[in-house]
Image: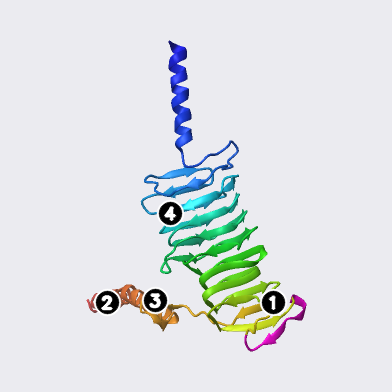
Amino acid sequence: MKIKKTAAILAAILATLLVLPFSARAGGKVTGTVNLINVRRNVSGPGYNWDNINKVLTLSDLDLETDDDFGIKAPAGAAVVIEGDCRIVAARYGLSCSGSLTFKGDGKLTVEAGENGFFFHSSNSNHKAMFLGGNYDITGKSGPAIRSDKAEISLTAGRLRASSPTGVAVSGETVNLVGGSAELVGSLKVTHLANISGVDLTITSDAAAIISDNLITVANERIAAGDSEGSLRDADEYGGEKCVRMTSTYKRVRTSIIFGKNVPGYVDNILLAGAALGVACAVGVPILVKKRKTKKLYEKLEKEKTEK
């Protein structure tokens, strides 16, 4: 009877493990797809935590290596926070999402995938893949390291390195490189717009460094271009060379937290200094007045005592 009961418990545990959206081995390595699509509860495992209410996926020293097609399937509208040193290796796609996705944090994420390191397969041009911080080293072996069918890709802060032996490192409809730093080993290829401004950017390729079917806009950049890293020369604009190095000339001035972006940040400092002086006066002046009154009272009492 006890044997049957034990067997039933083991079977129940095994069934539970089989329906989990991930698999892990001892030692903290994740060896299956972390699938968060349609998940309606908090999920955690070695190196990752999914906060379902706030739609935040935190990767903290994640070590994911799988023979599955996908490393992580992220839901639309989620934020991915990178902490520590994280790694994803997958057969086809390191991280995929159909919808908007935001990356932030101050950690490092290394991704190696058989096709695309990051694959944003939304069919909606209003969706966005935004990099707001972190350090990324993304590799795609048989396709672009970062591929987006329609979603707009934007790097505003952090460091990004993307490489692919196919010759195209980043492929998308619209790509905005407007902050931080980026190194691409392979071309930046866009079907609509490549917008480059205020970023430190290096691209080395066997073809044109930047390929656009429509527009390339470059602003706030010092440009060096050539057909090899050894032949880079200062240029007024990008002219289709295979290698390009752009250095940001954009002066980032902190704006006022109190009054908004149209007011310089030093106004806040002046106001804070004035407020501190006001507090000092509010506290210090009554004390000085009280001391002066006390001194006069003592002088009066001393005078009256002498007259008597």
Residue drawn at the location 63% of the way across and 67% of the way down: 168
Of callouts 1 and 2, the N-terminal one: 1
Residue behind mark 4: 75
Which label is found at residue 41? none
| Mark closest to the chain's N terminus, 1 or 3 | 1
Q: Are marks 1 and 3 in contact (CB under 8 Å)?
A: no
Q: Residue at x 39, y 48 (%)?
A: 38
User: What scheme was used to colour the molecule?
Assistant: rainbow
From mark 2 to mark 4, how far is it between C-alphas? 71 Å
Residue at numbered disc 1 = 243
Residue 264: x and y in percent read: 43, 82
Rendering coords of residue 278 (x, y %): 34, 77
* Coordinates of residue 1 in the picture (x, y in percent): 43, 10
* Of labels 2 and 3, the one closer to you: 3
Front tag of 1 and 3: 1
Q: Badge 2 is on which residue?
A: 293
As drawn, is 274 to the left or to the right of 136?
left
Tell me if 283 is positioned left or right of 239 in this view.
left
In front here: 303 or 97? 97
Element type at mark 4: loop
The image shows residue 305 at horizontal and vertical percentages of: 25, 74
| Nearest to viewer (mark 1 / mark 2) | 1
Residue stretch rendered in magenta on the structure:
229-237
Marks 2 and 3 in Cβ contact (< 8 Å): no
Residue type of the residue flagged with mark 1: Cys
Question: Is residue 216 one of those drawn in magenta?
Answer: no
Q: Earlier in the sequence, mark 3 or mark 4?
A: 4
